[in-house]
Image (spheres, helix red, strand yellow):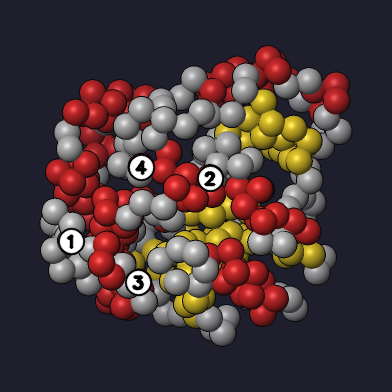
Amino acid sequence: MIDYKKWIKSRRVRLAILTWLSFIPDKLMVLIQYKIKMGFWPNLKNPKRFTEKLQCYKLFYRDPTMKICVDKYDVRGYIESLGLGYILNECYGVYNDADDVDFDKLPNQFVLKDTLGGGGISVIICKDKSHADLESYRAVMRKWTHAHTGKSFGREWVYEGRKHRIIAEKYIKSDESKGGLIDYKFFCFDGNFEFMYVISNRQLGGLASFGIYDKNFNRLPVIRKNENQLNDCTEKPSNFYEMVKIAENISEKFPEARVDLYSQNGKILFGEITFFSGSGYISFEPDSFDFEMGEKFDLGKYLCKY
């Protein structure tokens, strides 16, 4: 595996290079990226690994609803259409430009997000507006709305040609001494929940505490490489099976989807839907878990369309 970030430390330079390489066909680019990031070539003709199947998912499966679901504002309509509007966090507004955000109309605490942001970045958390540098917030949001909208760097077609907007939401209070806002990420296949990530102690722009669980909330002897491991004892939420039911309902339409939920004071809240977790460049230890997840992922007739 090539640690390209050590060779090209500037993220801006890395993105500029990827933009310049947009002319490379998707299939070839996926092969190259997989080799660089995973250390070996993917088998796209007869994929067995979860990470290989995610590459095929990018290349060969197209459902227009997926484009709606990856936008943090548009997905609200999809969730409401399922009769699940009650799990949506309160939204204060959506804006096309940073200058459209009227901070006077926002409460003292709020969260701002890039509607197409992912990976826990492109988020601003304001816990006290009276002491916040609001103009610095605008500077950050301008970068979001002027972000690349052409060929996806990871060749994730759902993001291509989309408008980056800003969404303002209610700040969810949590107990930092108990891991803060714990993120439950449900991996579902054809609407069936199989595995989950549990993430706590998240720091914006940094690592979080990370655990992998089965569908009965048993911690698995598996780690995701390059992540801090979850060392504290995370209890199963009292409403866990209700969360499972909701995740399966949300994901039922898709061959694979990761549904992110929160549980605060007994209330379930929706986070986001992700179809290409980690862009499909994820390393596990033991490596066999990549195959174990892959066994649950059936793309059927959409595989191997060359």
Q: Residues within 10 Å of mark 3 (few under 14, many from 20)?
A: some
| Residue 107 pos. (x, y %) | 86, 33
Mark 3 and mark 2 lie on one chain; the one further toward the N terminus is: 2
The CA distance from mark 1 to mark 4 is: 17 Å
The CA distance from mark 3 to mark 1 is: 14 Å
Judged left or right of residue 114, residue 292 is left
| Residue 268 pos. (x, y %) | 74, 64
Judged left or right of residue 228, residue 102 is right
Q: Dot 4 corresponds to which residue? A: 157
Q: Can residue 243 be seen here?
A: yes
Mark 1 and mark 4 lie on one chain; the one further toward the N terminus is: 4
Type of amino acid under label 3: Phe
User: Which residue is rendered at x = 51% and y = 28% of the image?
Assistant: 163
Q: Mark 1 near mark 2, Cβ–Cβ under 8 Å?
A: no
- Residue in the foreground of this view, choosing between 63 and 171: 63
Res. 297 mark: 3
Type of amino acid under label 1: Cys
Secondary structure, mark 2, is helix
Q: Dot 1 corresponds to which residue? A: 304
User: Which residue is rendered at x = 57% and y = 81% of the image?
Assistant: 217
Type of amino acid under label 2: Ile
User: Which residue is rendered at x = 74% and y = 32% of the image?
Assistant: 93
Q: Residues within 10 Å of mark 2 (few under 14, many from 20)?
A: some
Res. 68 mark: 2
Q: Is residue 86 above or below residue 113?
A: below
Secondary structure, mark 1, is loop
Q: Mark 3 near mark 1, Cβ–Cβ under 8 Å?
A: no
Secondary structure, mark 4, is helix
Mark 4 and mark 2 lie on one chain; the one further toward the N terminus is: 2
